[in-house]
């Protein structure tokens, strides 16, 4: 897990977050697809958590980099994700399952940096990636 002092992130630094996602991509386990993905999330505890995709011969058991990073953050005590960077060779965006997990722990305005391994990136919001997303607010009150 990569960590960063929360004082260093008083302002979001997209370049640092994408650089950590690119570094995480290098640890991906992708013997089947050959498509490595890295992710880094800035959590509300001020720490950055990284993840890479981990494939499995039973394909549905594969886990995406974004979900690895988010579950690491939550399992370490963070409660919300403030920003996410994802890195691939060609600048691919998060899959639908990852977007839904991002919805659970982020906000519609959360910045998502979609990076290529050369360091270039584009920025979107979670709402742009998951318009009209379903969340706990859509569930009936208990």
Image: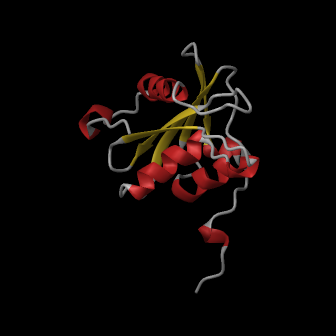
User: Relative to 66, is 85 above or below?
Assistant: above
Q: Is residue 76 rendered to the left or right of residue 94?
A: left
* Camera sees residue 135: yes
The quadrant of the picture occupied by the N terminus is: top left
Query: Residue at point 69% right, 62% down?
Result: 134
Left or right for 98, reference 45: right
Residue positioned 46% across, 27% down in the render: 14
Q: Is residue 26 above or below residue 67?
A: above
> Which of the 4 quarters of the picture holds residue 54?
top right
Q: Quadrant location of residue 133?
A: bottom right
Residue farthest toward the bottom in the current orientation of the protein:
142
Q: Is residue 109 visible?
A: no
Q: Residue at x 70, y 29 (%)?
A: 92
Horizontal and vertical percent for residue 77?
36, 58
Which quadrant holds the C terminus?
Answer: bottom right
Query: Is 62 above or below relative to 31?
Result: below
Spot occupied by residue 130 in the image (x, y as percentages of width and height): 70, 48
């Amino acid at each position: 897990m990569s960590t960063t002092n929360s004082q260093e992130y008083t302002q979001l630094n997209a370049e640092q977050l994408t650089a950590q996602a690119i570094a995480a991509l290098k640890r991906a386990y992708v013997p089947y697809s050959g498509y490595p993905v890295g992710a880094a999330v800035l959590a509300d505890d001020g720490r950055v958590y990284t993840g890479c995709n981990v494939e499995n011969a039973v394909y549905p058991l594969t886990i995406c980099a974004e979900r690895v990073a988010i579950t690491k953050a939550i399992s370490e005590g963070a409660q919300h994700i403030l920003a996410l960077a994802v890195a691939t060779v060609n600048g691919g965006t998060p899959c639908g399952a990852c977007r839904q997990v991002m919805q659970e722990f982020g906000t519609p305005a959360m910045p998502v940096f979609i990076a290529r391994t050369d360091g270039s990136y584009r920025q979107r919001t979670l709402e742009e990636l998951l318009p009209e997303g379903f969340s706990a607010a859509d569930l009936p009150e208990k």
